[in-house]
């Protein structure tokens, strides 16, 4: 079975308090030199059958209508190697 | 004859029975609606109550939006039926795009439960006619995904058209843009807000205030006196 | 893979078995062999080892817990006593209430969020299994030092887990405790309480009877949760590559649990359930053996029918899995179809996995081959019982001799003022709203009182306004100084908290958090605490309905303070008559009820100002507690008082400050002539409360106290916007509020 | 500035209620053929200075001690191209 990964991140202009909270905590934990942190979601889909263009198109549609809310989020779809 | 108000239960809805009680206290007849049924049982209005439908997994309201009952709600809302989304219900309404914008995790990242002061900015919707414009009310707020966001253009449009229905007072509890607590569609029949009017309808319970009753009495007047 | 069947076990008596790795003692293993007349199969060994563990069998505590039954007060209200998933109390008008406290201490240290979340999930299923709709939760919590870095990891995670799970279930959180003490550094205590309501006729029990009735497992699929320990078995019995890694922690799914609640209540409504048991610790091993043991016949289970999340699980692992959000029901054959239909409606997976037999054995099969054949009682109810040795520790005398009365006291009013502020702002005495604001207290629309009130109160009937109140309390410092008195003080405080809100205390539940029972000093603390609690309940007339014991809370040789946590349930006929804690009306008179002695041992003052723990805890007088409670209840019923707040840690000044802040009104205090203001403000004498009396009721109220013999001194009046102690100091409310409310956010932000 | 991505996923044997909820919803939305869905977190870190072995080792440590809870989660660290 093939794995397709959909990454969903908040659009750059939207405030990401989760990422900020991580970033703020880092120096306290002794980790310096991280200028910015953004936190998003990663979906791993196990796809039955071949992952051809048609399948990817369907997954793209699924991401656009369901996995991401495109009012606030961007997404990428890729086949995991 | 009184009006019939449908109260939808999705899997994971929590405030359905509370909403039914509030509807009843206001003198309306609550009608339970089930997410799998397209049939709205000839109700005159619908409330989408609070809770964690589908656990709020993925995004709050994202999965419920696709339930059969919502197909009918969307059709009816577009035809002018009064629809109120409270908290999770508001989130569902934004996911369906009946209302613009989206709801994100609170800026402080915590669930917050408190008595929240609001200003009623628009007293002409189906759900706010019993208030005065500018009136200040206090009702409970309780959520973790309550931060309202939309792009600047949408926000400006909402402001210009008087569609910001409620604004937070005395401190923005979650980072919502422009202190927006609730909005309405252009027609004024679809309203969504994060705070919980249905939890402020009895003097003894909760915060001890009844400021939320006006939502339901507004509807009663609209439907019965119409 | 070779299966260790019953037949195979009988044929291979000499096969070595990993009983020690599974935590069994040699004699326990021998006993299992004697019971079965052969060596156990791997699956049987798994079941016995987990069911005979301390956690499931109460083998160290049982001999002491018996007192709760033996000394139980005569009480008609008790409908179901200790032994079931939770006790049930009659609260009148045909209603019954069930409640219980549980601990999830160790898992919450390893994985704070999931540990605490699954703790809530577990106790809610216990309440549900009794036939009740869960209506509220509470969470008594204890953490290490407030400023310790690890507390920043554990506390926010625990609170988020309790909120994340409880909020998602739609259960209002109406109270609890947050206590800091370095003794809990490596052993935080995460106790969780749930209250449920039903009609008398809806009570359900965990037993399997009626040969031919079906055994239905429903809820989540079974995965490898919480079975880190049994992997040793799989590796012993199964293929050489060894078992997959199994997680030792469980992950909760509150959404699934919410569906399980609604689904189960609908099953009850249609009378489809003969017997029911939730799956908690020890999973299916526990549920099947307890159901069969309590029932009249035997049980036959086809284990391969259990729906799995992980197809590689061995039968032993399936039996021991602690996957959450599962229930097991006994259903008449004719009702199975409807049962499954309702489960389908709620998207809950349900599977018939076996049936009740007319035999006397619990028999479990795996793809047709028998892997378990045991008398269920020997697994579930007739486990080992230890008479652990106990002895008063040699340091106890020295600890008690180290009297707090010797500590230096404030010499000037300014010093007294500064110490008041310091105590009010200390982590244990400070406002906990940073925590409680993360919990939904409004959901269900029946919350009459919630934190920070003395007890949580919910309405249970909308027509008649019948309600119940619950409070939880525990004070490990008192219990360390004297475990017998400490347990009684926890009981007394909780009882007082319930009465302060106007409810009549009816019954208790408890969670006994202690160190290792293998240490005779700890065992002595346990014996003393249980004896104190049992004697106390007898005297107060409040039976123990159930509870939980959590042992081995220690790091190396150092045990936590003995920490008995007591939850008291009370009933109030009309919630409109409840008494809140806030001083709201200027001019009302403040009365202090009870006697104030010089009692500073274990006090908040001794901890905050001197970091001291020594001496004796406050004196216990349960007859006085009863009298105080009667006065508070009568005063509420007859409308004689507008506010009441019990006095406990922090003493009078703490209570007055809290009531003033809550109501946004100040108070002028005039302490009785000839008394030491320091003692008056900080002593923690038990059996006291402060009440706010409308002037029009003063005479009636004082007459009542006098007639019944309860000391009541007028100590001041609600007035202004500061707490003013005449002749001593004045503290503006804003300064007090800042001190009280800033501490916890500053520590955790 | 270079971007390093840390993906954090629940261990395979741990219950993933979020992924399950998504998977169960898919057929209803008309998307068939997805055998399994797992949902995890994606962190995008903007790193100041060179992303050499030392930097990656530090980020690995950060992931292990902070971004992931290795009792229940696995993680991967990689430089974004
Ligand atoms: N973890 C918690 N969850 C819910 N309520 C809490 C919690 N901790 C404290 N509270 C509430 O805060 C209030 C004050 O707590 P505490 O000082 O321990 O009360 P008391 O002194 O009466 O025992 C009580 O109403 C208690 O129920
Ligand atoms: Mg109290």
Image: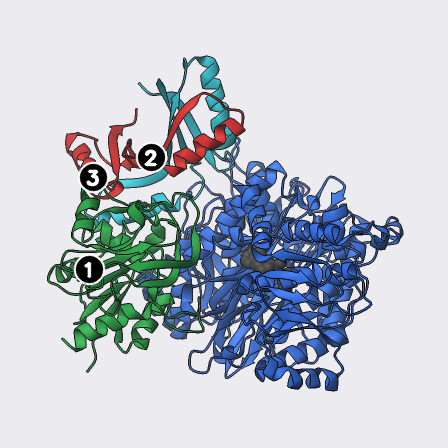
Chain colours: A red, B green, C blue, D cyan
| Picture residue at 42% right of the left edge, 82% below the top | C463
| Picture residue at 17% right of the left edge, 62% below the top | B189
**Residue A14 screen position, x and y as percent:** 29, 37
In the image, taking residue C342 as reference, residue B220 lies left or right, namely left
Question: Compared with residue C526, is residue B206 higher up or lower down, i.e. above or below?
Answer: below
Q: Earlier in the sequence, mark 2 or mark 3?
A: 2
Judged from the image, the quadrant occupied by ligand 1 is: bottom right
Q: Are marks 1 and 2 in contact (CB under 8 Å)?
A: no
Cα–Cα gap, marks 2 and 3: 14 Å
Q: Which residue is mark 3?
A: A64
In the image, taking residue C553 as reference, residue C571 lies left or right, namely left
Question: Compared with residue C209, is residue C106 higher up or lower down, i.e. above or below?
Answer: above
Label 2 SS:
strand
Mark nearest the camera among 1 and 2 is 1
Can residue B115 be seen here? yes
Q: Which residue is mark 2?
A: A42
> Which disc is residue B190 wearing?
1
**Residue C16 screen position, x and y as percent:** 66, 39
In the image, taking residue C642 as reference, residue C367 lies left or right, namely left
């Amino acid at each position: 079975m093939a794995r397709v990964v959909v990454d969903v991140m908040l659009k750059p202009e939207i405030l990401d308090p989760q990422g900020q909270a991580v970033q703020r905590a880092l120096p306290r934990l002794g980790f310096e030199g991280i200028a910015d942190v953004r936190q998003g979601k990663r979906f791993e889909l196990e796809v039955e059958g071949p992952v051809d263009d048609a399948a990817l198109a369907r997954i793209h549609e699924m991401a656009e209508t369901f996995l991401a809310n495109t009012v606030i989020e961007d997404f990428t779809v890729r086949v995991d190697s | 004859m009184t009006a019939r108000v449908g109260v939808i239960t999705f899997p994971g809805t929590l405030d359905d029975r509370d909403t039914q009680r509030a509807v009843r206290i206001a003198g309306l007849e609550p009608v339970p609606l089930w997410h799998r049924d397209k049939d709205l049982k000839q109700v005159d209005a619908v409330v989408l109550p609070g809770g964690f439908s589908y656990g709020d997994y993925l995004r709050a309201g994202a999965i419920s939006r696709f339930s059969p009952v919502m197909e009918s709600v969307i059709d009816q809302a577009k035809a002018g039926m009064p629809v109120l989304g409270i908290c999770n219900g508001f989130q569902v309404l934004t996911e369906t795009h009946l209302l613009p914008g989206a709801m994100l995790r609170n800026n402080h990242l915590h669930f917050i439960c408190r008595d929240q002061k609001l200003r009623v900015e628009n007293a002409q919707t189906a759900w706010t006619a019993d208030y005065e414009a500018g009136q200040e009310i206090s009702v409970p707020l309780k959520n973790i995904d309550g931060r309202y966001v939309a792009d600047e253009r949408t926000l400006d449009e909402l402001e210009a058209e008087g569609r910001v229905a409620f604004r937070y007072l005395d401190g923005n509890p979650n980072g919502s843009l422009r202190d927006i607590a609730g909005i309405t569609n252009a027609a004024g029949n679809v309203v969504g807000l994060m705070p919980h009017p249905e939890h402020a309808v009895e003097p003894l319970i909760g915060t001890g205030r009844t400021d939320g009753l006006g939502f339901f009495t507004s509807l009663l007047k609209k439907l019965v006196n119409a | 893979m070779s299966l260790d069947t019953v037949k195979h076990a009988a044929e291979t008596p000499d096969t070595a078995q990993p009983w020690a790795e599974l935590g069994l003692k040699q004699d326990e293993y021998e006993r299992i062999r004697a019971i079965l007349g052969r060596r156990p199969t791997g699956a049987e060994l798994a079941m016995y080892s987990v069911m005979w563990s301390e956690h499931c069998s109460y083998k160290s505590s049982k001999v002491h817990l018996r007192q709760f039954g033996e000394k139980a007060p005569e009480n008609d209200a008790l409908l179901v006593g200790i032994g079931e998933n939770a006790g049930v109390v009659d609260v009148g008008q045909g209603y019954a209430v069930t409640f219980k406290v549980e601990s999830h201490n160790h898992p919450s240290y390893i994985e704070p969020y999931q540990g605490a979340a699954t703790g809530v999930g577990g106790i809610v299923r216990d309440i549900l299994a009794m036939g009740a709709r869960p209506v509220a939760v509470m969470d008594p919590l204890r953490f290490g030092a407030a400023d310790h870095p690890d507390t920043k990891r554990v506390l926010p995670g625990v609170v988020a887990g309790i909120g994340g799970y409880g909020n998602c279930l739609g259960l209002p959180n109406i109270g609890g405790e947050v206590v800091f003490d370095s003794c809990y550094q490596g052993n935080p205590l995460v106790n969780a309480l749930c209250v449920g309501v039903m009609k008398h006729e809806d009570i359900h029990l965990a037993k399997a009877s009626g040969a031919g009735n079906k055994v239905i497992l429903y809820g989540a699929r079974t995965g490898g949760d919480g079975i880190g320990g049994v992997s040793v078995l799989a590796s012993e019995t199964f293929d050489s590559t060894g078992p997959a890694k199994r997680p030792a922690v469980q992950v909760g799914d509150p959404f699934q649990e919410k569906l399980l609640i609604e689904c189960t209540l609908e099953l009850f409504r249609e009378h489809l359930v003969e017997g029911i048991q939730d799956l908690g610790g020890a999973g299916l091993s526990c549920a099947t053996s307890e159901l069969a043991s309590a029932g009249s016949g035997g049980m036959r289970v086809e284990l391969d029918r259990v729906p799995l999340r992980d197809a590689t699980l061995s039968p032993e692992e399936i039996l021991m899995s602690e996957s959450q959000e599962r229930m097991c029901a006994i259903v008449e054959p004719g009702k199975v179809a409807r049962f499954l239909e309702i489960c389908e409606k709620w998207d809950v997976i349900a599977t018939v996995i076996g049936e009740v037999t007319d035999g006397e054995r619990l028999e479990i099969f795996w793809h047709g081959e028998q892997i378990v054949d045991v008398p269920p009682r020997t697994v579930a109810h007739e486990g080992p019982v230890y008479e652990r040795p106990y002895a008063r520790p040699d340091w106890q005398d020295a600890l008690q001799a180290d009297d707090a009365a010797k500590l230096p006291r404030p010499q000037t009013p300014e010093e007294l003022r500064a110490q008041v502020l310091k105590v009010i702002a200390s982590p244990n005495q400070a406002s906990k709203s940073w925590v409680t604001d993360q919990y939904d207290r409004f959901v269900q629309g029946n919350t009459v009182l919630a934190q920070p009130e003395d007890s949580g109160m919910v309405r249970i009937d909308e027509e008649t306004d019948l309600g119940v109140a619950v409070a939880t309390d525990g004070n490990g410092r008192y219990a360390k100084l004297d475990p017998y008195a400490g347990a009684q003080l926890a009981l007394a405080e909780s009882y007082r908290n319930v009465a302060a809100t106007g409810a009549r205390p009816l019954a208790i539940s408890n969670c006994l958090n202690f160190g290792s029972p293998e240490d005779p000093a700890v065992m002595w603390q346990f014996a003393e605490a249980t004896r104190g609690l049992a004697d106390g309940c007898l005297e107060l007339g409040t039976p123990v309905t159930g509870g939980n014991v959590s042992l081995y809370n220690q790091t190396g040789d150092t045990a936590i303070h003995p920490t008995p946590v007591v939850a008291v349930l009370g009933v109030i006929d009309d919630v409109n008559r409840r008494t809140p804690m806030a001083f709201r009306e200027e001019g009302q008179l403040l009365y202090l009820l009870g006697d104030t002695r010089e009692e500073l041992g274990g006090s908040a003052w001794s901890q905050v100002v001197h970091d001291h723990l020594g001496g004796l805890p406050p004196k216990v007088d349960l007859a006085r507690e009863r009298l105080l409670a009667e006065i508070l209840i009568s005063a509420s019923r007859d409308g004689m008082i507008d506010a009441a707040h019990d006095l406990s840690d922090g003493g009078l000044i703490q209570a007055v400050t809290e009531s003033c802040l809550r109501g946004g009104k100040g108070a002028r205090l005039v302490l009785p002539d000839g008394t030491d203001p320091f003692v008056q403000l900080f002593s923690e004498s038990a059996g006291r409360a402060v009440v706010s009396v409308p002037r029009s009721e003063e005479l009636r109220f004082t007459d009542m106290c006098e007639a019944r013999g309860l000391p009541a001194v007028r100590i001041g009046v609600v007035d202004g916007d500061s707490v003013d102690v005449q002749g001593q100091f004045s503290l503006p409310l804003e300064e007090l509020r800042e001190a009280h409310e800033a501490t916890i956010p500053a520590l955790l932000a």
